[in-house]
Image: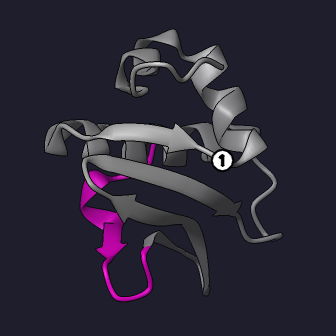
Amino acid sequence: MIDAAELVDNDFLRQFELKVQDDLAKIEYSLQDRKIFLTKLCIPECITSEKFESDFLTLVFENISERNISVVPTSPEIARFIRKNRKYKKMLPVGIRI
């Protein structure tokens, strides 16, 4: 399991970052009003575990949930994650369906 303390919200580059070995897993975002648009998921090729992607996204969604802002997934991988984890559907803004 990934430690929450390892997750970095890089405001300058607008991405969540997680250092993995000598590489960086990241989720790029755009913040507008009270919505965060998750635009791109980048996982290093050295990571072959399917569980890593799920753990990373869970960590990011928990971080966003604490801020009490809505999530708009524009990346297919992130939309797929929300479909599999229905508890995060409540974080979608009104009118957005996946």
Residue under the point 77% across and 41% down: 76
Counting from the top left corner in percent of width and height, residue 90 is at 37, 16
Instruction: Work out whether 74 lies above or below 39.
Output: above
Quarter holding residue 79: top right
Residue 6: within the magenta?
yes
Which residue matches tag 1? Answer: 74
Counting from the top left corner in percent of width and height, residue 93 is at 39, 27
Quarter holding residue 8: bottom left
Residue farthest to the left?
A: 67
Which quadrant: the C terminus?
Answer: top right
Counting from the top left corner in percent of width and height, residue 20 is at 56, 72
Which quadrant: the N terminus?
Answer: top left
Residue 54 appears left or right of 60: right
Residue under the point 54% across and 53% down: 38
- Magenta residues span 1-14
Residue 32 appears left or right of 77: left
Question: Label 1 crowding class (10 Å Cα cut-off): few <14, some 14-19, many 20+?
Answer: few
